[in-house]
Image (cartoon, rainbow, N blue to C red):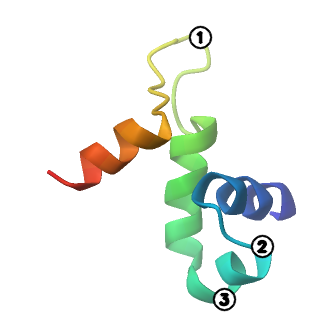
Amino acid sequence: MTRLVYAVAAHLHMTAGEVETRMDSHELFTWATLLFGFGSDPASENVVTLGVEDEIAAWGK
């Protein structure tokens, strides 16, 4: 769990404390899926990795 919190914090340019305070377990699991591809087929290479600019553009749609 700590690794996930630090990964999300680094990705969002937040502190680990802010992530723990602001996000519930469902949101953290969603980030885990996005960042680490949990639940996907390990043999598949269809995991999408977005850069910061791509992610901002995706949220703007």
- The residue positioned 57% from the left and 35% from the top of the image is 37
For residue 8, which numbered disc appears in the image? none
- Label 3: which residue? 21
Q: Residues within 10 Å of mark 3 (few under 14, many from 20)?
A: few
For residue 16, which numbered disc appears in the image? 2
Quadrant of res 21: bottom right
Q: Is residue 33 left or right of residue 20?
A: left
- The residue positioned 40% from the left and 40% from the top of the image is 53
Say what amino acid the circle numbered 1 marks. Ala
User: x and y percent of residue 16 in the render?
Assistant: 77, 73
- The residue positioned 57% from the left and 79% from the top of the image is 23
Residue lying furthest right in this view?
2
* Front residue of this view, candidates 58 and 42: 58
Whether residues under marks 1 and 3 lie with C-beta atoms below 8 angstroms apart, the answer is no
Whether residues under marks 3 and 2 lie with C-beta atoms below 8 angstroms apart, the answer is no
Can you say whether 39 is above or below 10 in the image? above
Q: Is residue 48 left or right of residue 12?
A: left
Say what amino acid the circle numbered 3 marks. Thr
Does label 1 or label 2 sit earlier along the sequence?
2
* SS under mark 3: helix
Does label 1 or label 3 sit earlier along the sequence?
3
- Label 1: which residue? 43
Quadrant of res 5: bottom right
Question: Gap between marks 1 and 3, in whole Å?
Answer: 35 Å
Does label 3 or label 2 sit earlier along the sequence?
2
Say what amino acid the circle numbered 2 marks. Ala
* SS under mark 1: loop
User: x and y percent of residue 43 in the render?
Assistant: 59, 10
